[in-house]
Image: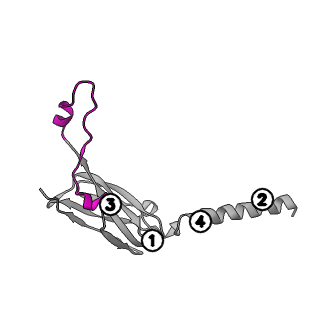
Amino acid sequence: MGIRSSLAAAVAVACLLCLTGCSGGDVSDRQAVSGTVSLNGSPLEKGTVSFQPMEKGVGGGGTITGGKYAIARKDGPTTGKHRVVISSAGGSSAESANAAPGEPPPPPKELVPEDWNVKSDHTVEIKSGKNEQNFDITAKK
């Protein structure tokens, strides 16, 4: 094996180690997660849920439809403790209709309280195997 071949092999191994090490977790450790999300006792019609690693690992997330979500293993978080972030932008077409001519409509209002998204301190433990995580959110009126 020549010097060029040895150098190319060393660079390839270094790149591979960097790619696997940079994720902070073994992506083969990803887990499927599913469950329900309700807001004030009713299923959250649409939104997103994400699991953000608290230490090392890989996060994951998915879409909420009709109060349910299912994240496939290939898109799921790795095992460990994760911060839960849930969001649902709502709004009515009446708000868009009230926008001044030539002005963009106001951004949709967030339906989920900020303590479940931008200020979330809700956590769950993702384990190997089946992960069912259900969330019942109460918004102050």
Sort mark 1 into few (<14), some (14-19) or many (20+) by Cα contacts within 10 Å.
few
Q: Which residue is mark 3?
A: 85
Point out the tag, 1 or 4, that comes first from the N-terminus.
4
Q: Which residue is mark 4?
A: 20
Q: Which residue is mark 2?
A: 8
Q: Residues at badges 4 and 2 in contact (C-beta under 8 Å)? A: no
Point out the tag, 1 or 2, that comes first from the N-terminus.
2
Residue 93 inside the magenta-drawn segment: yes
Q: Which residue is mark 1?
A: 55
How many labels were placed on the picture?
Answer: 4
What's the residue type where badge 3 is placed? Val
Question: SS for tag 2?
Answer: helix
Task: Name the mark nearer the viewer: 1 or 2.
Answer: 1
What's the residue type where badge 1 is placed? Glu
> What residue appears at the point 59 percent right and 67 percent down from the top-left corner?
21
Between 84 and 5, the one lying in front of the other is 84
What's the residue type where badge 2 is placed? Ala
Which stretch appears magenta?
A: 92-119
- State how far apart marks 4 and 3 are (Cα): 26 Å
Point out the tag, 2 or 3, that comes first from the N-terminus.
2
